[in-house]
Every structure is written in C-alpha cells, then in structure tokens.
Amino acid sequence: MIPLSPTVAPFINHLLAPEPWARDKLRQHTGKTAAIDIQLLTLKLKVSADGLVESAAGDVQPDVKIIIKASDLPLIAQNRERAFSYVKVEGDAEFANTISQLGQTLRWEAEEDLSKLFGDIAAVRMVAAARSVAQTVKETHQKLQENLAEYFLEENPMLVRPAAVSALGNDVNKIRDDVERLTKRIEKLERLR
C-alpha cells in the first residue's frame, strides 16, 4: 500500500483552515484516526486538538476505516452527495458521519488560491478553462456510453432492450396458454371416442 497521508494532510488542512465550523466538528474527535483505503493507496489521518489533521503512523489501528473501490472513484466524483453510498465503513460510525459531512460540504476555492499566484484575471480564466475541460470530458463520456449502448443494441446485438424482453415474455406466456388449451381439447376429444 502506498501511504498518501504526508502529501494529502496539508491540502485537507488548507480546506479546513478558513472553516471554523468544520474544525469544531473535527475537534469532537480529537485523537481519533481515520484510514481511507483506495485499494493500492492508503490515507491515514489523525485529528489534532486544533481541528486540523496530521499524518498518522502506519501501524496505528484506525478508529474508522473507509474502504473505496478504485472503480467507484468516477461515481464518487460525479456525485459527492452520494459518495458515502459507494464506500464500506468499519468502526466508529459517528466519526465516519462527520467525515462524510465534511467531504460533502468542504470545497476548494481554486480561483482564490490561483489568484494569489497569477492574479485575478488569470485565475478566473484558468478555472473557467478547467471547468470547460471537465464538462467536455463529461459530455464525451456520456456520448461514448450512448454510442456503445447503441452499437450493442443495434449493430452487434449483445444487449436487448427491456421492451423486447417484456414482449418476448408476453409471447411465451401466450404460447404456453395456447398449448395448455390445445392439450385440454385433445384430451376432451380422446374421451369422446
């Protein structure tokens, strides 16, 4: 496992620093350790008395462990409000709930940070360009999904539309009923002989 804690803790603290309400929430869990396991990458953080986080030692037993499948990361990125529905949580539920709430509400103000380095106009343009790229990637992903679905439905039928499955089911039921009626008629005719 690759430890990420030393590199991620300063970024998380950067998000927490201007938010006293968030630090107050974390202060309630002072001394507790959280481990976020993303298959090959691990993030272990300990809550300090000031409501910020620090890197935790690798051998420390975490109070809460949050396990995330790498394949679920795009889903989590698309919908942060539902992020915790994609993870498995072990340990302190209250601490995990606090982490979830902070994950949903804390936002990085990239424009503000970039303006300190490059000026206001350049920062606004950089963020707008990044949003445009992100939107283009999202639209391309959606179009690719639609094209693949159409290909596998129409050109190389490996998938079946739900309406076709339903119609087939109805046809099978109708044929079964017809066969049962025909069988009863044949039996009735044989008894008449």
Image (cartoon, helix red, strand yellow):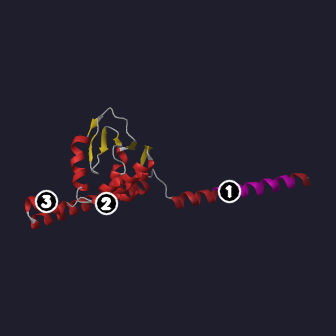
Between disc 2 and disc 3, the foreground one is 2
Nearer-N-terminus badge (2/3): 2
Q: Return the residue nearer the eye: 22 or 130.
A: 22
Inspect the image, locate mark 1, and give the three-letter code of the amino acid beneath it.
Answer: Ile
Q: In the depicted view, which residue is nearer to us: 148 or 155?
A: 148
Q: Position of residue 80 (x, y in %)?
A: 35, 57
Find numbered disc 2 in the image and state the secondary structure of the residue it sits on. helix
For label 3, the crowd category at 10 Å Cα-Cα, with few meaning under 14, some 14 to 19 and many 20 or more, is: some
SS for callout 1:
helix
Residue at x-position 35% and y-position 53%? 76
Considering every residue shown, the one lying at the far front of the view is 49
- The numbered disc on residue 175 is 1
Pointers 1 and 3 in contact (CB under 8 A)?
no
Residue 185 placement (x, y as % from top left): 82, 56
- Neighbourhood count class around disc 1 (C-alpha, 10 Å): few under 14, some 14–19, many 20 upward: few
Relative horizontal placement of residue 3, taking residue 85 as reference (left or right): left
Question: Residue 178: which quarter of the image?
Answer: bottom right
Give the residue drawn at x 38%, y 59%: 81
Residue 175 x/y as whole percent: 68, 56
Q: Identity of the amino acid at label 3?
A: Leu
Identify the residue at horizontal 27%, vertical 37% (top origin). Answer: 3
Residue 7 image point, x, y percent:
21, 43
The stretch of residues the image draws in magenta is: 172-189
Mark 1 or 3, nearer chain start: 3
Separation of residues labelled 1 and 3 (CA atoms) = 69 Å
Residue 100: in sight, yes or no? yes
Q: Which mark is residue 106?
A: none
Which residue is labeled 3 in the image?
114
Mark 2 highlights which residue? 21
